[in-house]
Amino acid sequence: MGSTSNALDKGGNNFKKLYEDSNVKSRNANGQTKSGLYSLFIPMEWNMEGFIDIYGQPVLTKPEDKIRGVDNEWIYNGAVDYWKAEVESLKSDADALNEYYRQFPRSESHAFRDESKGSLFNLTKIYQQIDYNDSLIIQHHLTRGSFYWDNGIKDSKVIFRPDKSGRFLVSWIPPKSLQNKVIDRRNGKFPMNEHIGAFGCDSYDISGTVGGRGSNGALHGLTKFSMEDAPSNEFFLEYIARPQTAEIFFEEVLMACVFYSMPILIENNKPRLLYHFKNRGYRGFCMNRPDKHLNKLSKSEKELGGIPNSSEDVKQSHAAAIESYIEKNVGLDFEGQFRESDTMGSMLFTRTLEDWAKFDISNRTQYDATISSGLAIMANQKHMYLPQKKESKIKLNFARYTNKGTISELLT
């Protein structure tokens, strides 16, 4: 691969899968990759026009003396230096910068970037974070695993076990003192770590679909500032999957909530997950929609909790919450407004970052990770969405009299 791929919806996704299945480092006992092919990526600086010398060698950095090129023209600059200067000049235009990365890729993540199409979010920051994540040994930062009821006894204690085939990716496991902190009250079970963070969930109701192409269920956990032994304002859990049955998905979401002892904000357009929580006695975990006062909720909203995805106000608030989070916590903050200018953000879940980059607010259905992550952000800042109370002034009509003459008279 010596150039960029097509847009993801124009064959790029299929080629990306073929490329990933051809990783020479992932071969079976017979020495073969999944595809039977070997992938090779050639960065743009090794074959960039105008930077190849007369011997066919690339000029990577600025030479001390001019070099004659294969086209008999003099080369004064290096391909990498030229590329960096172009990138620097495009930093104020996220869409143009993204397209430049696509056309002149220096890494695999550059080559597989999608067309921006006027992305709703800051692509520069998102791809800064993706590039940084790609440079990490991600297994040292994320653990794949599964949650289980202790000894298989439901509604007891939940434990987490690393598992290569697990559907959960986690970056933080709370200390034992913060695990399974559930309190029983007369009206059910309630989480005790709401001050640490919350979950957001994009659920589904139907186990199987025609052709097996149903959207995934998605769950994200996000912390907020607290005095506990926990990270601040960081996503710590990602789950994007569609198990064989919806019931498996419901139970896995429930176990994650119990283990972390945090509440969850769920889309209520597909209410089976909410009923699953209620029927098991966990209604106290399901947050009510934060944009309405309790006495303004409908009967079903009071019974189950959750938030609809059909309201235009909710859609706008959801997108604005993600946009704000990206500006503050993703990529580099060159202006040093929210953290040190050379400190990278702490969003380790690349699949969610890629979903943010592609998000289309007019067609939200296919962006499961964006929906659930946005709900997690809204759950942690629910105070921002409460409607303002209208204060009505109390009019006190006191009778007023004149004080002229010997007898006062009532003023009208």
Image (cartoon, helix red, strand yellow):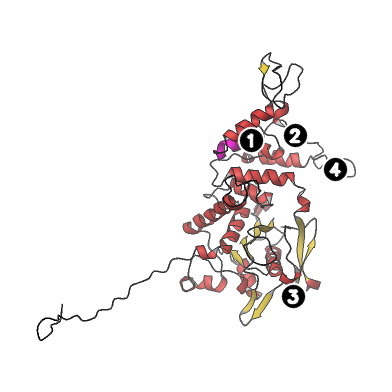
Identify the mark at residue 27; answer none if there is no mark.
Answer: 4
Q: What secondary structure is found at the residue carrying circle 2?
A: loop
Identify the mark at residue 101; answer none if there is no mark.
Answer: 1
Mark closer to the chain start, 3 or 2: 2
Q: What secondary structure is found at the residue carrying circle 4?
A: loop
Mark closer to the chain start, 3 or 4: 4
Residue that mark 2 sits on: 41
Mark 3 crowd level (few <14, some 14–19, many ≥20, 10 Å Cα): few
Q: Report the residue that reaches farthest toward the left.
A: 405
Q: CA distance from mark 1 to mark 3?
A: 50 Å
Report the amino acid beneath label 2: Phe
Q: Report the residue that reaches farthest toward the right.
A: 29
Mark closer to the chain start, 2 or 1: 2
Mark 4 crowd level (few <14, some 14–19, many ≥20, 10 Å Cα): some
Q: CA distance from mark 3 to mark 2?
A: 50 Å
Q: Nearer the viewer, mark 2 or mark 1?
A: 1
User: Magenta stretch: residue 145 in it?
Assistant: no
Vertical order, 232 against 258 (above or below): above
**Quadrant in the picture for the N terminus:** top right
Q: What secondary structure is found at the residue carrying circle 1?
A: helix
